[in-house]
Image (cartoon, rainbow, N blue to C red):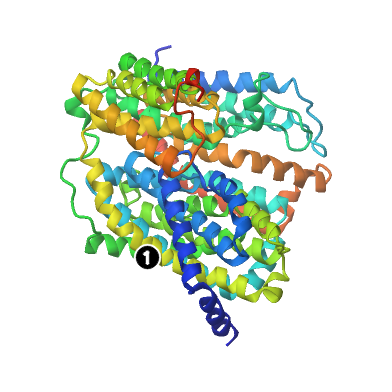
Amino acid sequence: MDLLSNLALGFQTAATLQNVGYAFLGALLGTLIGVLPGLGPVATIAMLLPSIYSLDATPALIMLAGIYYGAQYGGSTTAILINVPGESSSVVTAIDGYQMARRGRAGAALSTAALGSFFAGSVGTLVLAAFAPPLTEMAFKFGSAEYFSLMVLGLIGSVVLASGSLLKAISMIILGLLLGQINTDVISGVPRYSFDIPELTDGIDFVIIAMGVFGFGEIIANLGQPSESREVFTKDVKGLWPTRDDFRLAAPAVLRGTALGSILGVLPGGGALLSAFAAYTLEKKISKTPEQFGKGAIQGVAGPESANNAGAQTSFIPMLTLGIPPNPVMALMVGAMTIKGIQPGPQVMASNPDLFWGLIASMWIGNLMLVILNLPLIGIWIKLLTVPYRFLFPAILVFCSIGLYTLNNNNFHIYLAALFGVVGYAFYKLSCEPAPLLLGFILGPMMEEHLRRALLLSRGDWSTFVSRPLSASLLGAAGLMIIIVLLPNIRRKREVAFQDAD
Amino acid sequence: MKIKSQRDFVSGLMFLAVGIAFAIGAGNYSFGNSAHPGPGYFPLVLGLILAVLGAVVLFTSLSIERDGGDPIGAIAVKPLVIILGAVVLFGFCLPRLGLLISLPILIVVASLASDEFHWRDALISSVVLTAGAWAIFTKGLNLTLPVYPTIFGG
């Protein structure tokens, strides 16, 4: 039993007092920065990199990993409580989680998120331990064409998740993709749509749009209503724990989310993010009551939360086994390993077995600590919601504004977010849903890169996307999804037409 | 032509205008060809798609009947101006006056947006939130935020 002896070695390494301490420190720090909007794991790990010079490699990596998955937990807390996703992968959690909180079910939403994440994290860790080598083979099969098709599938999925007009949801995605074009072109190095403003040449940080549109826009919309009808949160909070009914609905969603996240997390390029979106789409598709989604369906919290946590764990696979960082956090981890004189790649497992397996075992310990750390906090978060809105909204503004400034120690980002506040309020007034826009914005640059690379490889032949079987089946699934969404629409319109003919 | 959905009419116009603006802007960058797509390739195509979608939304807003004309309703000018004004003011003050002065300004100005404004509440918020933010961000996380006005050498 290789797996067992490997895990035994891992737990031996991870369970030392020092390593448990660093896992705890990382998880705590991660939760804290995840809760504070604007301050992400990338910035925190970057700030902490110098301090790991004095640490051994194993505790250093254990702490950095703890920050990463701790932030996934914390990010969902703000998404549920104040509708400001602290992390890009909690954008979907905000949709139904915030609605649950508004209906007095914040406790159930938070504990479902925490327990689902723990389960998914544990399974993700096991998957990482057992399947690291074979799963890496799968990631190799993905070329640019497949990535592009996968993202098309993800975007189409986000249309399905919008509850309003299909046409407007697609328009919002394209608008998001276009906003993502404000950057420096990766291939030619030309700054695009920057209007000679230096801050715009790096592109807009997703946090700026999320805070402006979701945070500021929401506050303005709330204050615009007379205080009697505002009722942002129901006063009577019903129970901290999920009910038996919740468990019945959430448990299968957690299982599906975990499976989906474990697979998608392996793929380089937004693994945790894509898996959260894919899980939401899946839950809504197979639900018997899809009309509940967007109005506080517990599956809409359980599925994506499990998926992004499983994805966060398995995204270590390409980094640890191939030395290829699938996202910016992993890129920093590679940097940290290099600082400690370890060459990331296939040889780590053989040359530093105690580091490799110790890191994996520490993730399980860290996830357990996160649950222990977070469950008592739920009560405190709930108390926060009983604070009257006239005290709550200045607090949200304070945290958002400071978070915006610390993105780059630059007040330009605050001005930009204020501009997106106007845009967000306009979206609210025009009933345009902002979630698809944010997804398009996040995926846009990656999509463009893969599209252009795939076209370059095929010498401009667009058929490359359908002639490769993996890519073709992904696009096929996307097409199928559109047809399924359109069918009821067509039927309804035909009914109307027939009535008119009478 | 009668507008049958005010919200869709305006959103259609918005998509159309933004799409055209991006497509025109893309003209500044090289288009390339499909084997070597240039920096203008993606935004031009996307801009045109958005413009077409916007036109379709605009068309449906004029042709498909809706309940009560789907009105946009009153715009909350007061909260819009005050909240975003407070945020912009904070952005302007922070590097100059530091956290300990800028935060109370942000909180008091923003509180004016609420129709339940009381000086007492706004002052309580200012003290509690400023102390809390200082403790968490400056002391706890060691972020390099300007705390004191620059004239005091901060």
Q: Which residue occupies the foreground of this view, A111 or A15?
A: A15
Drawn side of residue A290 relative to residue B147, left or right: left
Drawn side of residue A411 relative to residue A104, left or right: right
Q: Position of residue A68 (x, y in %)?
A: 52, 54
Q: Residues within 10 Å of mark 1 (few under 14, many from 20)?
A: some
Q: Residue at x 56, y 43 (%)?
A: A43
Q: Position of residue A452 (x, y in %)?
A: 75, 41
Instruction: Single out the residue that lies furthest toward the bottom.
Output: A1
Res A421 visible: yes
Q: Quadrant of the C terminus of chain A?
A: top left
Drawn side of residue A491 relative to residue A476, left or right: left
Q: From what the image shows, is residue A218 above or below residue A111? A: above
Q: Position of residue A148 (x, y in %)?
A: 66, 47
Q: Residue at x 18, y 47 (%)?
A: A237
Q: From what the image shows, is residue A345 above or below residue A457? A: below
Quadrant position of residue A230: top left
Q: Quadrant of the N terminus of chain A?
A: bottom right
Quadrant position of residue A57: bottom right
Q: Which residue occupies the foreground of this view, A298 or A480?
A: A298
Q: Look at label 1 and name its amino acid.
A: Pro
Q: Position of residue A443 (x, y in %)?
A: 59, 42
Drawn side of residue A129 relative to residue B122, left or right: right
Q: Residue at x 56, y 85 (%)?
A: A5
Q: Which residue occupies the foreground of this view, A240 or A333?
A: A333
Residue bearing the label numbered 1:
A252
Count all numbered tags in the image, as a single digit: 1
Quadrant position of residue A368: bottom left
Instruction: Single out the residue that lies furthest toward the front.
Output: B152
Res A487 visible: no
Chain of the residue under the numbered disc 1 shown in the image = A
Question: Which SS class for mark 1?
Answer: helix
